Image (cartoon, rainbow, N blue to C red):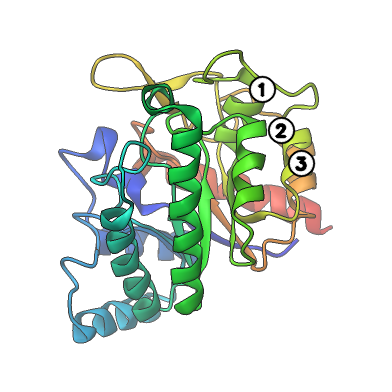
Amino acid sequence: MKRRLSIGSWAYTIGPYEKNPVDFETVCNKLRDLGFDGVELGAFPPHPSPDDHPSAEDRARLKAFMADKGLGFSGLAANLWSQQLVNAESPDAWLGEFKRNCQFAVDLGIEAVRIDTVQPPTMVGEVGEDTAFSRVTGAFNEAARVAADHGLRVTWEFEPGFAFNKTSEILRVLDAVQHDNFGVLYDTSHGHMCAVVGARHNGERETLAGGQVELIDRLDGRINHIHLIDSDNTCHKDANGEDETSMHLPFGEGVVEFDPILDRLAKVDTGHDWWTIDLCFWPDAWEATERCKTWLDGVLAARSN
């Protein structure tokens, strides 16, 4: 099974690394030395972003830097978290920032832009489900059209920390955003927390008897990006000690049974061959990177025999 492997650069800049981030050049040097094929760019400080690479010349230098390292970009996580979406009467500010990130992606040769619903599931109750759904899907439809004009894919990452994280809600959103370049980002930790645990579901928890494999089956045909990492049935805690989003543990340190999940994901046609490790919020992400790469290399080698 041949896959290009990358890792999300945000693992080294947010959460436990917020006050002591690892600079982008150091990250890329380590990924090159470990045999990664690329990096998934968290396009927010202190790593490269539309703000600190504003000119065509800036972006050309960054693109050349990556080529010199022998690394590609598997995708771009757009910095949209300063925006509002569920409780915003107009999506214009969110879309404006999205457009800037689309141009940044094009200039760097990146083919996919990651988005989410920005605000927590509790926000749905504050504005009403119909209003929240209309605002999110309206913005997502327009984002898909903008991305198509730039030749880009949009990949929506559902997770416990953001609105619309039940299987039925995810499918309903996908039914309302019918664009060939729009799909879901399937993260194995979020998949576990949403389908198996039912974390941060509004109202009654909605879990699946078939767990992640059933969820992947239901989403097949709409998955256009994949993140891989473990889960221990818990959420990362915010500054107040409240559940935020899924914990992302190094492979083998959680409870996810990867064999059937990876067998199923291997059959998913995302339209590309990238698989991305995501160590978001893991306190020892820098040290765990090599272990995760070694584990995934072994899994892929075993499946190629």
Q: CA distance from mark 3 to mark 1?
A: 14 Å
Residue depth check, mark 3 versus mark 2: number of the one nearer the observer: 3
Q: Residues within 10 Å of mark 1 (few under 14, many from 20)?
A: some
- Please, is residue 21 above or below residue 48 in the view? above
Q: Position of residue 121 (x, y in %)?
A: 44, 27
- Please, is residue 14 above or below residue 180 in the view? above
Tag 3 secondary structure: helix
Q: Which residue is mark 3?
A: 218
- Counting residues from the N terminus, which is met first, the one under dot 3 or under dot 2? 2
Q: Position of residue 161 (x, y in %)?
A: 43, 30
Count the labels in the image.
3
Q: CA distance from mark 1 to mark 2?
A: 7 Å
Tag 2 secondary structure: helix
Tag 1 secondary structure: helix
- Please, is residue 170 above or below residue 129 in the view? below
Residue contact at pointers 3 and 1, CB within 8 angstroms: no
* Residue nearer the viewer, 4 or 227: 227
Q: Residues within 10 Å of mark 2 (few under 14, many from 20)?
A: many
> Can you say which quadrant of the picture contains the N terminus?
bottom right
Which residue is at 79% across, 21% downward?
A: 209
Q: CA distance from mark 3 to mark 2?
A: 10 Å
The kind of residue on which mark 2 rests is Gln
Which residue is at 29% across, 68% downward?
A: 100
Q: Which residue is mark 2?
A: 212
Give the numbered dot on residue 196. 1
- From the viewer's perspective, is 112 left or right of 184? left
The kind of residue on which mark 1 rests is Val
> Can you say which quadrant of the picture contains the C terminus?
bottom right
Which residue is at 44% across, 70% downward?
A: 146
* Residue nearer the viewer, 19 or 141: 141
Q: Position of residue 132 (x, y in %)?
A: 44, 36
- Counting residues from the N terminus, which is met first, the one under dot 3 or under dot 1? 1
